[in-house]
Image (cartoon, rainbow, N blue to C red):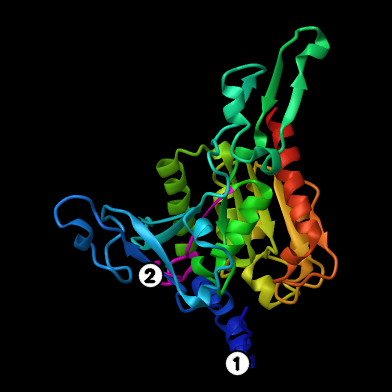
Amino acid sequence: MNGLSVSELCCLFCCPPCPGRIAAKLAFLPPEPTYSLVPEPEPGPGGAGAAPSGTLRASAGSPGRWKLHLMERADFQYSQRELDTIEVFLTKSSRGNRISCMYVRCVPGARTQPVSVTWGSPDLPAALQGGNEHRGRALWELEGLLGVGIGFIHLWGQGYTLLFSHGNAVDLGQMSSFYVGLGSRINCNVFSYDYSGYGVSSGRPSEKNLYADIDAAWQALRTRYGISPDSIVLYGQSIGTVPTVDLASRYECAAVVLHSPLTSGMRVAFPDTKKTYCFDAFPNIEKVSKITSPVLIIHGTEDEVIDFSHGLALYERCPKAVEPLWVEGAGHNDIELYSQYLERLRRFISQELPSQRA
């Protein structure tokens, strides 16, 4: 978050700015793009030479497929095999911006719903293929214990896709390695997008665009991949908790994860702020109570950017909050390095959510 000068502080109280100006001052630091989207050759006349090589040029509404080109600054940590699991495409927001989207298939053959197959069914061997023995968590219910003699296996771990809204000062290229690692470790596919003005997404960053951007991503995930809301976990990190909370307050989904969340822009700039003013930006504190899905809040106790008190305040205001994860000693950008981070996510997704769906 950027600092405010003394003169700007005086201006803030004498002539309160609009929420958009607060948002721009506090939050948006889009990096130089670390990736580009290259149109793949279209079949038919012209062959492989029909499509130009290079960076993104076509509009969001244009047909065809895209290939991800990562620059050295993206610092991709995996091999070509993992890179080939990443799909990229463009969609368009309601505010007319072209939004870059990324779908990381971390769970090959994953299904969008939990699957129940009868013991001895022809479908059972296929259901156990694809690395489930070390990727998934199978929950066995043996009805034979009740004298029925029929068993069922529930493949819950393959039922969820994260809709991930990333933090500030990064784009999809920089986040791609993290998505591959996270998804394979918690057994979920990961869908993400770049905010307007980030990466190859067009437009300029703004609070209104954040909300339109995640709406476009939500619709693309549902229509393009056929994933139902009860299989989507909304995940927001830092500034990404703003569109995540907004969407979750309007749509029901499988669950919500708020990673280093903020209560509002004014409360970040002025920690003693006790109420939400009309000119405040990012008012998560006013929206979180409207979320009807289970909410996991994760925050470091030594967060130097968004104080730990923000996570506590949201937890207290959220009616559907589950047991939170307060990471002792963690700051704003290193929570992922603590072992309890993955442990808590795994337990939430592979045990707590399936038990609620049963």
Residue 343 location, x and y as percent?
A: 78, 52
The stretch in magenta equals 189-208
Q: Which residue does the image show at 32% across and 54% down from the upper left?
A: 65
Q: Which residue does the image show at 58% across and 57% down from the upper left?
A: 180
Q: Which numbered disc, 1 or 2, marks the residue closer to the eye?
A: 2
Residue 26 falls in image quadrant? bottom right
Q: Secondary structure at mark 2?
A: loop
Q: Residues within 10 Å of mark 2 (few under 14, many from 20)?
A: some
The answer to whether residue 265 is seen in the rendering is: yes
Mark 1: amino acid: Ser
Residue 244 belongs to the span the image colors magenta:
no
Residue 348 falls in image quadrant? top right
Residue 194 location, x and y as percent?
A: 47, 64
Indicate the quadrant containing the N terminus: top left, top right, bottom left or bottom right. bottom right
Q: Nearer the viewer, residue 271 or 104?
A: 104
Q: Which residue does the image show at 55% across and 39% down from the upper left?
A: 110
Seen in the image, is 352 located left or right of residue 8?
A: right
Residue at mark 2: 203
Seen in the image, is 189 located left or right of residue 312?
A: left
Residue 251 location, x and y as percent?
A: 55, 43
Seen in the image, is 42 located left or right of residue 298?
A: left
Residue at mark 1: 7
